[in-house]
Amino acid sequence: MIHYNEANEIKNNAYCPYSNFHVGCVLEMKDGTLIKGVNVENTAYGSTICAERNALLHSITQGFKQKAVKSITITSDSDEPTYPCGDCRQVMLELCDHNTVVYMCNRTGEKVKKRKVSDLIPTNF
Ligand code: THU
């Protein structure tokens, strides 16, 4: 299910002094656990980590295995739905099911796009 409220709340913890663009992500694991992530920027811009990868990598740190994610909810400061970047889609492909659901929300939660991981990155390496 969608976890907009939790993603919107954790978004406030983003470290984004360079873009001032806050992103929050919540993974709903198949056992019901929620794992959260925010974007963490760096003065060396390429060292920035997105909210989605932060949450997904943390799930592995927490001891979850591949394919344990049921759904992913993303929100940001944008008026439009928040689509994950290519790097995050590749990590979703690695760690999620093809049918893991991704809810991409805008700032207010009024605009939501729902897609499967396989819709966002349809072909495998
Ligand atoms: N960002 C994310 O965390 N997730 C996305 O889906 C899009 C981009 C972050 C990276 C950077 O800190 C800021 O948003 C601006 O690109």
Image (spheres, grey):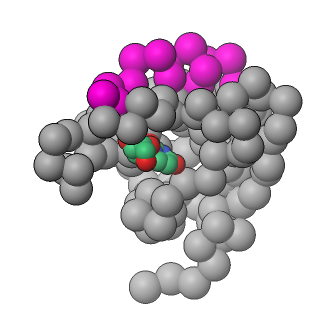
Q: Is residue 15 magenta?
A: yes
Q: Nearer the viewer, residue 26 or 8?
A: 8
Q: Does residue 103 lie above or below 2 as drawn?
A: below
Taking the image as drawn, is residue 84 in sight? Answer: yes
Residue 115 appears at what percent x and percent y?
A: 75, 57
Q: Nearer the viewer, residue 71 or 37?
A: 37
> Is residue 46 left or right of 108 when viewed as pictured?
left
Residue drawn at x 43%, y 85% as measured from the top left? 125
Residue drawn at x 85%, y 30% as measured from the top left? 110
Q: Does residue 61 lie above or below 66 as drawn?
A: above
Magenta highlight: main SS: helix
Q: Is residue 61 magenta?
A: no
> Is residue 44 left or right of 71 when viewed as pictured?
left
- Indicate the quadrant of ligand 1 in the picture: top left
Residue situated furthest left in the rendering: 44
Q: Nearer the viewer, residue 100 or 111?
A: 111
Residue 42 appears at what percent x and percent y?
A: 20, 40
Residue drawn at x 64%, y 67% as measured from the top left? 120
Q: Nearer the viewer, residue 23 or 90?
A: 23
Residue 54 appears at what percent x and percent y?
A: 35, 40
- Bounds of the magenta span? 4-17
Residue drawn at x 50%, y 23% as measured from the top left? 11
On-image quarter of the N terminus? top right
Residue 113 appears at what percent x and percent y?
A: 79, 49
> Is residue 54 left or right of 34 when viewed as pictured?
left
